[in-house]
Amino acid sequence: MDRYQAVFLDLFDTVVRFETTRLPTVRIGDREHPSTTDLLFDEVSPHAPGLDRAEFRRALRSLLATLREEKRVDHREISSDERFRRLLVGLGADAPGLAERLTDRHMEALTGCVLVPEGHPQLLADLRARFHLVLVSNFDCARHGRSLLVRTGLDRLFDAVVISDEVGWLKPHPSLFLGPASALGLAADAVLFVGDTPETDVLGAARSGMDSGWLNPRGEPFPEGLPGPTYEIRSLLELRRILLRP
């Protein structure tokens, strides 16, 4: 009998990965950095006369730092639309529909860099033949997240998709772990949660009573002070050895 009845998987840098060389770049000093900042500035500047790029970058960096701290403290998701709405209000550049356009420009560039590694679709199909398969993602724009899944064909490989933007909470909050387990009628110890981030995926699984698989492709040390994973793997394909042995 299988040890687990369901496998829950993180999305970014677990099921899919970012190819950041595909992102647009901004020049800071003598270096180019991958960023959508200039795309966003081009959208905002007609609504904020006198705003220069440096001021826009500072405002965006400051807001992102504030949002990271808010999320760290209470684990509540803040949507991409709300993020840009707050940016525009701070700049005195709020206009109908502009925050949503900023989200679309940013997310189109970001999701355009996403690649599905070779072997992952077949692995997911094989896992789903034996287990309930659920995708659980911290992502602040559900409409673009779901569009990405449709574009890559991954939407057909999961029994359920849980996105923080729709739930209102972020991993490691237990809602993203226990909610889908309850919907499937499963106890927490019947689920293996697999992801790449110790502070969200592994910790959240442990707090929810689930086993975890930590995807650690670079062989980094596990952070001190956190409950360790049940399994440590270098590649998602190692789940074949762990879960799909005859």
Image (cartoon, rainbow, N blue to C red):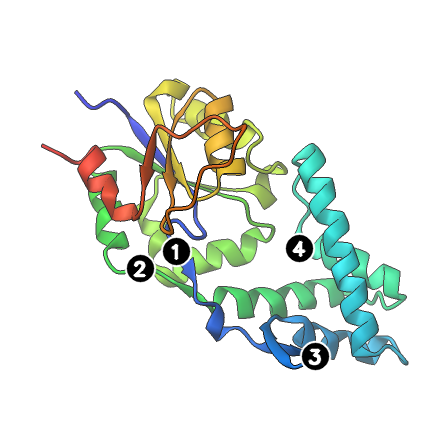
Q: Position of residue 132 (x, y in %)?
A: 30, 33
Q: Quadrant of the C terminus?
A: top left
The foreground one among 2 and 146 is: 2
Residue matched to label 4: 80
At label 1, the amino acid type is Val
At label 3, the amino acid type is Gly
Q: CA distance from mark 2 to mark 4?
A: 26 Å
Q: Quadrant of the N terminus?
A: top left
Residue matched to label 1: 16
Q: Is residue 78 above or below residue 102?
A: above
Report the side of 30 relative to 50 (left or right).
left
At label 4, the amino acid type is Ser
Q: Earlier in the sequence, mark 3 or mark 2?
A: 3
Residue matched to label 2: 117
Q: Nearer the viewer, mark 2 or mark 4?
A: 2
Q: Earlier in the sequence, mark 2 or mark 1?
A: 1
Callout 1 environment at 10 Å: few (<14), some (14 to 19), or many (20+)?
A: some
Q: Earlier in the sequence, mark 2 or mark 4?
A: 4
Residue matched to label 3: 29
Q: CA distance from mark 4 to mark 3?
A: 28 Å
Q: Position of residue 57 (x, y in %)?
A: 76, 69
